[in-house]
Amino acid sequence: MINISTFDLNLLRILNALLREGSTVGAARRLGLSQPAVSAALGRLRHALGDPLFVRQGQGLVPTSYASGLEAPLRVALEELENVLAGPQQFDPANTQIDFRISGTDFFATMLMPELAARVRRAATGVRLQLVDLVPDHYVEALEQQDVDLALLPERDFPAWIAHMPLFRAEFVVIARRDHPVLGAEGIGAGDVFPMDLFCALGHVLCSPDGRFHGLGDDALARAGRSRKVVMSVPVFEGVLQVVAASDLIALLPDSLVARRGPDPGITILEPPMPIAPVQLSMIWHRRQSGDPAHAWLRGMVRDILAPLERRATPGAPAA
């Protein structure tokens, strides 16, 4: 057990740098120290913590299991301490020049950005906003390297250094073109439950930023012991709408997105034939920005715009 009253807390900064850099040279460069000073500090850390912490592999250092377990909580603790010591900050939206980068799919180009632009322009003319494509497998790196301020994506297990806020659950409807010949022949109209056999037999178009031909609908069908025929994927939701309106393909889309577009003379909206679990959408950011008043201001606006989407949207109803 470490006696915190006698432990040199500066050693934790050095341990954090070693975990991030994987070498005493890199850690020294990050901290503005000499390499011998970092090596000496590593020796003190090993003695104090009772663990080798790192083993040499080639030109680098590989953390032990104990050191690896310290990495995430140590980073969070140091960042929270920095926020505490920074003290209260002032933020005046009307007199601030700042850029914000938000990462998300084109869903948020429709559901967030128009209203966010209107609110920001009223309150802070010096603020600039940029929506950048969400790369699902690289959102962690984007936040860590400060490429983005916020990311909007489905809830999942996030690293300890990521803060997150649930926003709303997306539910899904089936869309088809209004004059679809098969639906007309079967007497199926807006608001009906799409027959399972027909749903599986017709061709589907899928919104898939990474180009895969598998999505949420396939998982729901598999639970029912069925499968569908995905014949096309496009990277954006707007593309799905355009394909459905111009073809006999059908698609699953978030109901809030369909409702936001309002009544579409070329689209029929129906209920899925199988239960589809809602997808929880969340806003995430790096914990180092949790106490930043400008960042908190942006988060509040995003929350206020998107949280009402939790209410089940009715096709053709006014947008929330």
Image (cartoon, helix red, strand yellow):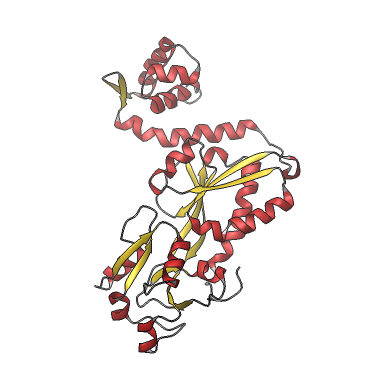
Look at 39% across and 76% down and name the residue there.
272
Q: Nearer the viewer, residue 284 or 209?
A: 209
Q: Nearer the viewer, residue 6 or 37?
A: 37
Residue 137 x/y as whole percent = 38, 46
Quadrant housing residue 111: bottom right
Inspect this view and state whether residue 245 appears: yes
Look at the image and tell me in which quarter the N terminus lies.
Answer: top left
Residue 186 position (above or below residue 37): below
Residue 258 x/y as whole percent = 51, 70
Residue 244 x/y as whole percent = 42, 71
Quadrant housing residue 215: bottom left
Residue 69 x/y as whole percent = 36, 35
Quadrant housing residue 45: top left
Residue 284 position (above or below residue 57): below
Inspect this view and state whether residue 51 appears: no
Q: Is residue 136 left or right of residue 112?
A: left
Look at 63% across and 53% down and name the residue there.
301
Q: Nearer the viewer, residue 29 or 256?
A: 256
How many numbered discs, if any? 0
